[in-house]
Amino acid sequence: MNIIKLKSIFTPSSLVTSYSRCGDKSLFVRYFSSKASNTDKKDLVTFNYINKDGSKSTVSAPVGENVLEVAHDNDIDLEGACECSVACSTCHVYVEPKYYNMLPEPTDEENDMLDLAFDLKENSRLGCQIVLTKELEGMTVTLPSASRNMFVDGYKPPKH
Amino acid sequence: MISNSFKSLYTGRYIQQISQYRLFCTSTSATATKTDASKFHLCIIGSGPAGLYTASKVHKHLPDANITVLEKLPYPFGLVRSGISPDHQNEKKVKNTLEKVLIEHPQLIHFVGNVTIDKDIKFQDIQKNFHAVVLACGIEGDRKLGIPLEDKLKNIYFARDFLGWLNGNLKDQNRKFDLTGKNVAIVGQGNVALDVARLLLKKNSDELKKTDITSTAFDQIHKSGVKNIHIIGRRGPLEVSFTNKELREILNLPGINTYINDISTLDLSPEQISKLDRVRKRSYDLLKEHLKPLESEQQLENTDKMNLIFHFLRSPVEFIGDESGGDSLVGMKLEKNELVNDEKTNQLKAVGTKEYIDLQCTSVFRSIGYTGTKQFTGVPFDFKSVSIPNHLGKVRKDVESPEFIPGLYVSGWIKGGPSGSIPNISHSSEETAAQLYLDYSTNQIDLNNSVSGEFGFQSVLSILKNANHRIINYDDWKKIESEEVKRGKEKGKLLEKIIIFDDLTNIINNGN
Ligand SMILES: Cc1cc2nc3c(=O)[nH]c(=O)nc-3n(C[C@H](O)[C@H](O)[C@H](O)COP(=O)(O)OP(=O)(O)OC[C@H]3O[C@@H](n4cnc5c(N)ncnc54)[C@H](O)[C@@H]3O)c2cc1C
């Protein structure tokens, strides 16, 4: 499950403004995913995002895509600054504990990035490293939010 | 002007307004809010990650807002272009995320480069011509060691200038770095220290050559005589500021020896190990696995490989010049430290033992942080925290003041101090953008101060035009970039950066 080096980091294409999050892989998956969604519902996984404002989005996406790519395909506000190269933690999410335990262990590289994630918790993972499998049907992932508290009724900024 | 005091946050009116906002926010999604902000003009100073992230996050809240991003350099992206190491192209990919906001909204969001505040345009004029201003200008002013001969001897550099130089940053192109000597010392144990060490260790790397490092810089590094790189820190291996990713990366470089000055600093009991937090435990494991004890200088000689030596619990107390009394550096005097619990902060601090050793080196890079500078008239700066005093991004009237300067915000390093990587900046900008939006939607930003005539972006253009000042806009920048790509291609590398200002203007003028 190592997608770190799928795209050579030294291709000039990384300069041309690209909207791809995961380099060539996403194109590859897209091609198959559109086929899959037309023909074979079996290969779709339905799961939920809790957005930064607390709202919930339910999406279906093919097995094999990762949680970051699916977020981008569905206009969910999850960043992916390093485009799935495991060089940042901007796609950090919290995974519902039941499902967290089903995921393969994070690699050292992912752990190094999680070290730097804002508000790390026991159930933190990088979205780009969560690859959809049928097992994950019904999972909920929550986006960390720097501002959610600020928009809550009666919120008082902490005194200091 | 509305008084924007801290207390007013607690008034009933404010809470009520937040509730209205909440209703509004939940009925639509936060990303598709349809406030009419077409009369709102925001100026962001600085186009590094903080500036562009803030632009994008404010745009999400207020899709009609007019945003002008002023930048003193001729190009955007701040330290992504001129700080992050060329062999960290994955980290540099954030450029694509940052640039989107400029590409997608050319009518609303304007990049204005090559503008120095107070030289080309007065800060007060910016405040007068915009409803709100976000300072996102990073932190400058590198910290010196403050020890004898530091200002007298040659070959004592700031690590950040070295990164700027090899990243093609215009202001660093006149600098010369002497890499001919065998022993180089780097003072400081944060990531930038590791960047310098790693780049020197990669002197034969074809991969590095093909990045956006300037060809001049690569040639110099390639030809360098450096064999031993000493990284010096005043505290122990458990107090380093390196992140584990950078540590893992350098310790795993092929073909190098990695040493520690005193292996006993890594002797921990199982009980001590069990008390380490997650991040420390992982960095401890890395150091323990990779560092061998350095028992004699001879070890460094008896190998063809380059040596990387971590010196823990050492503080430079004096630079050593050559015997002739000239300005050549030959070494540093280091004091051995021990760690003592500081009762005030409850943290371990390094205390000198009055025992000294000399370390031979002919070049030194300092990477021990920043002092910061007070840049803007009327805006306080806290030299202790090296940031502008603020609460959730709103600028305070003074360091401890409960009151705020209306319409003034901060984001990024200038807000939280000069540490933290890209994900922190994204988070910092999200908070500031949310605070600004909250103030906007609770009418705490005065929208009636438009003086007659021009306002916002147009007023900036007029002021600069009247002063005959050349700006560099986004389209100009794209011309520069495509020329850099073209020159890079010719040399079989990612980019060849343009490092002469006149070249930049010629490229823009000639178009393509
Ligand atoms: C050498 C080095 C290497 C790094 N490597 C990494 C890395 O590998 N990974 C990582 O995640 N992070 C890295 N960082 C950290 C990262 O660069 C910072 O977290 C980030 O750039 C801070 O963003 P900022 O926008 O606050 O400041 P900056 O990036 O410094 O941007 C500030 C911008 O404001 C402009 N400016 C300043 N004053 C004015 C003024 N008066 N008027 C107009 N414009 C002004 C500056 O020219 C600059 O463009 C590195 C930092 C350094 C120094």
Image: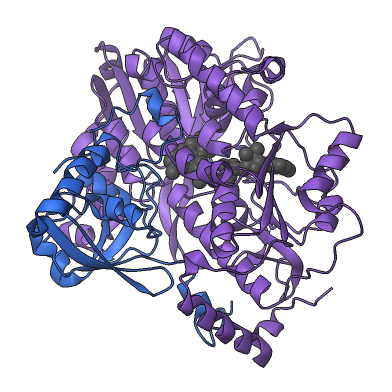
Chain colours: A blue, B purple
Q: Say left or right for B415 vs A52.
A: right
Q: Residue furthest front?
A: A38
* Residue at 70% in and 84% down: B7
Q: Say left or right for B412 vs B200.
A: right
Name the foreground residue: B60 vs B371.
Answer: B60
Q: Position of residue A143 (x, y in %)?
A: 35, 65
| Res B190 visible | no
* Residue at 72% in and 16% down: B502
Q: Position of residue B222 (x, y in %)?
A: 41, 10
Q: Say left or right for B64 vs A122.
A: right
Quarter of the picture holding the C terminus of chain A: bottom right
| Res B169 visible | yes
Q: Is residue B313 above or below residue A97?
A: above
* Residue at 83% in and 43% down: B118
Q: Position of residue B34 (x, y in %)?
A: 57, 68
Q: Is residue B153 above or below residue B180?
A: below
Name the foreground residue: B282 vs B181.
Answer: B282
Name the foreground residue: A126 vs B457.
Answer: B457
* Ligand 1 sits in quadrant: top right
* Residue at 59% in and 13% down: B322
Q: Is residue A65 above or below residue B344?
A: above
- Residue B434 is drawn in which quadrant? bottom right
Q: Is residue B350 above or below residue B304?
A: below
Q: Position of residue A84 (x, y in %)?
A: 30, 43
Quarter of the picture holding the N terminus of chain A: top left
